[in-house]
Image: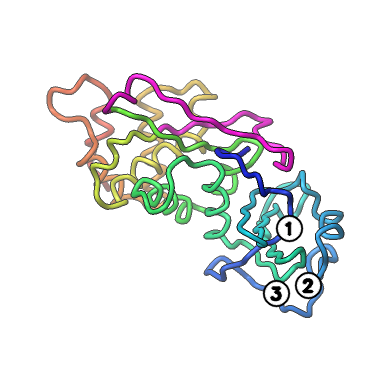
Amino acid sequence: MNKRARANLALTVCVLLVLSPWAVALPKDEAGIHGVTIGINEGDFLKIYPQNKLRDFRHAGVDDWLSFNEPLDGASHDVVTFYFQDQKLIRWALNDRPEIVKEYLAEFCFYQDPDVIYKAVRDVLLRMPYDDFLNATRRQRPMLFTEFYDSGTARFASSSEFIVNDNDPPCCKEGFTIIKLGMGLGLSKTPGPIEGVVAHEIAHRVLDTIRKGNVNCDAERAANRLIRKWGFKKEFKQASQLFGQKKGDPAGCQEVTHQAIR
């Protein structure tokens, strides 16, 4: 499912791997996972890693970045990303989270780089625990990051469109989560406070707050405890100071927003 049409998306399968702390590149002359080898062509590759098993992908010119759960069937412990160029496999890497995040946000986030809100979303996905990250970004139940306008004429009504193309792998069979990020978050000139807000909303997804019917102040406390456990204590405090309820605001979970940070 894409947020914009991709006319050139006929899978000329390509995957550029940017080596990172999460990536483990394999030697060029070594046989790959499940018999994939350097130089394999598009058609033969898709017989081993079928298109309907794609986790995420990006396309640019003659390059495609394709990521799959590893193993393909069963619980996902790793993600393998393949880089094809001119329909030939160049290399691959395991758990290259920066590339996986870039692929994911290219498809499921309406904000774009270099927007400060985009950077905050990206940074939270890069930093949160890996198992929680894999769970929250599953294609079967993705998170959609969309704008929420609270000023200008768009605050009355606005539209967003997700476009499904013939080559898109299956998506949203288990539903999806919409995370609406207010344009007012742009009041922060740095990503830190926004990261606190984004992490809090993703925590609700990981905790399945809505599906469990836990829409109350206890759920807010639980989400805040989780993001502090993830390592976002400073960002939570910054978010509370900048975006938390102020004197005179309607009553709510003020004890959550302003509670002491341990």
Instruction: Tell me: residue 101, above or below residue 2.
Output: below
Tell me which residue sits at (80%, 71%) in the image.
39
Crowding around mark 2 (Cα neighbors within 10 Å: few <14, some 14 to 19, many 20+) is: many
Instruction: Tell me: residue 12, above or below residue 261.
Output: below
Tell me which residue sits at (81%, 50%) in the image.
50
Q: Which residue is mark 1?
A: 13
Between 87 and 74, the one nearer to me in the picture: 87
Q: Which residue is mark 3?
A: 26
Can residue 160 be found in the magenta stretch?
yes
Q: Earlier in the sequence, mark 2 or mark 3?
A: 3
Is 165 situated left or right of 23 in this image? right
Q: Which residue is mark 2?
A: 38
Measure the alpha-carbon separation of dots 2 and 1: 13 Å
- Label 1 sits on what residue type? Val
- Label 3 sits on what residue type? Leu
Tell me which residue sits at (41%, 24%) in the image.
158
